Amino acid sequence: MGRTPEPFGAVLVVGGGIGGIEVALDLAEAGFFVYLVEKSASIGGLMARLDKTFPTNDCAMCILSPKLVECGRHLNIEVLTLAEVVNVSGEAGNFTVTVRENPRYVDVASCTGCGDCANACPVNLSNDFEGGLSTRKAIFRLFPQAFPGAFQIEKRGTPNCQAACPLEQKAQGYIALIREGRFEEALRVVRMDNPFPGICGRACHHPC
């Protein structure tokens, strides 16, 4: 009788915190191909939010940053961010896993991480990554050393004013730009959907 072949193949690591990153690197160095699944837009987990680590008071980001770079560059690691495991089937050594990736709304391959998009964005939101103590733009990156380094856009469905407008006018962007005194840009936003905004008051019976 022949020997039963030993299981082989890829490994799935769920969670891209410092523990998941370390496990992925160890497995990759051992020769396994690793899928690292993280639900947020960047690996790093809670350690990326810390200033110092206990008990040595070492800089948290000084420890984490090299591992982010190593994990991102390793040929045996594929990082899946904004992703979650929805189904696992099979048996030990032969699993089939279904992973759902949520949209980033930014092309990771094209984004250079320059931040010009965030500077141009007029929409301010509470920064949950910093405990709500600061604000961020609707297009953002979790932290400067994040991997992947591409920005993401947070969308919260269709605004009520846009959904109710027969023209689906993006009034929220127009209003945000007006608030910042960027009148020429506001007019360009309006004309993307409505080339002749001056007629709205005469033709539209839906008060915004």
Image (cartoon, rainbow, N blue to C red):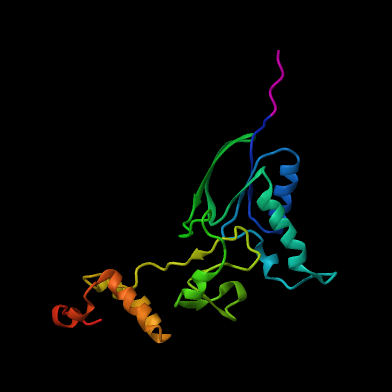
Viewer-side residue, 57 vs 67: 67
Residue situated furthest right in the rendering: 56
Which secondary structure class fits the magenta region best? loop
Q: Quadrant of residue 2?
A: top right
66 part of magenta stretch: no
Name the residue rendered at 64%, 38% in the picture: 10
The image position of residue 203, as x and y in percent, is 14, 78
Relative to 12, 117 lies left or right? left
Name which residue lies at 22% across and 82% down.
207
Whether 3 is among the magenta residues is yes
Res. 39 image quadrant = bottom right
Magenta-highlighted residues: 1-6
Determine whether, in the image, residue 72 is placed left or right of residue 63: left
In the displayed structure image, the side of residue 93 where residue 205 appears, left or right: left
Q: Quadrant of the N terminus?
A: top right
Who's the residue at 50% across and 52% down the image?
101
